[in-house]
Image (spheres, grey):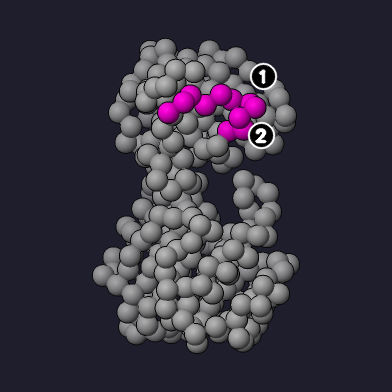
Amino acid sequence: MQDTKSSGVYGTPPAELAEIPIGAIQFSPLIPGSGPLEQQEEGSLGEMVVLAPPGTVERRYTIALALRALKPGGSLTVLAPKDKGGSRIAKELKGFGCDVAETSRRHHRICSAERPVLPVGLDEALTEGSPRLDEALGLWTWPGVFSWNRLDPGSALLEQNLPPLSGRGADFGCGIGILARAILASSKVEHLALIDIDRRAIEMAARNIDDARTEVHWADIRSGTGLKGLDFVVMNPPFHDGGAEDQSLGQAFIRRAAEALRPGGVLWLVANRHLPYEAVLKTLFKRVTPKIEANGYKIYEAVK
């Protein structure tokens, strides 16, 4: 296919299911370094391929952004596993005024359409999927971010049981800043690095945490953090990747924490009770102490 910068891709669609234009601009907020689709000029793209997210609000928002970025008549391909929103894509595209061609392959629904001259209902979908202030949390959040519309019970348990920390530390997988807010309540904390793979989470955390001691990083922790000599790391690591349970995610977070901590530095970790993190913790840390177990979660303190 002809190399063109007027093409875009959202996510990493399987190559056998959708052809990605050479030179396509990556727009997924879950791929550090990608472009923000929210800021793409209207009508500036000729082609767009979207691996649609599973959440309804997030998916409709992403499709609306893609349609807005396309020029009239521009080509849009949207696909997703059937059980993760794929079965709804055709109806949603038709709701935006698109004529849709739909195929099924390898448990995915693949929908193709052209951008109408005047798409219907874009503003509503864009408003619904935009950042909003959650009154219950007292924090800004964004549909699609982890636990965007509720307080994750694991984070809540760690927040309630975290001791006052001191020195320089990091919040691995910081989300919108729930745990960072608790960490920074200690005046002895000198500096806190907030790291997350989701650009939207980082933007919300930066908005929620107005503290000169903080620094935000949009990065994939699995690829390394570049942090050394930390006094503490706090984390509620993910254990799903693309909807499937992946225990290696949390294990990678633990390894990166061990690399970032100084000798004597401490890791505070909350995890689902069934996840087998104790073995990797004990190989990397001098002392591992289970602190509390409640509501299906467990908290560990691990000293390097």
Q: Residue at x 71, y 74 (%)?
A: 279
- What range is drawn magenta here? 13-23
The reply, left or right, for residue 280 in relation to residue 205 is right
Q: Quadrant of residue 303?
A: bottom right
Q: Quadrant of residue 214?
A: bottom left
Alpha carbon of mark 2 to alpha carbon of mark 1: how far? 12 Å
Q: Is residue 255 above or below residue 50?
A: below
Residue 103: image tag: 1
Given the image, on which type of amino acid does mark 1 rest? Thr
Which is more toward the observer, 234 or 127?
234
Q: Earlier in the sequence, mark 2 or mark 1?
A: 2
In the picture, the quarter occupied by the C terminus is bottom right
Residue 29: image tag: none
Q: Residue at x 59, y 25 (%)?
A: 18
Residue 90 highlighted magenta (yes or no): no
Q: Quadrant of residue 69?
A: top left
Q: Can you identify the residue that label 2 sits on?
A: 81
The location of residue 40, given as percent across then percent down, is 33, 32
Q: Secondary structure at mark 2?
A: strand
Q: Is residue 104 above or below residue 215?
A: above
Q: Main secondary structure of the magenta part?
A: loop
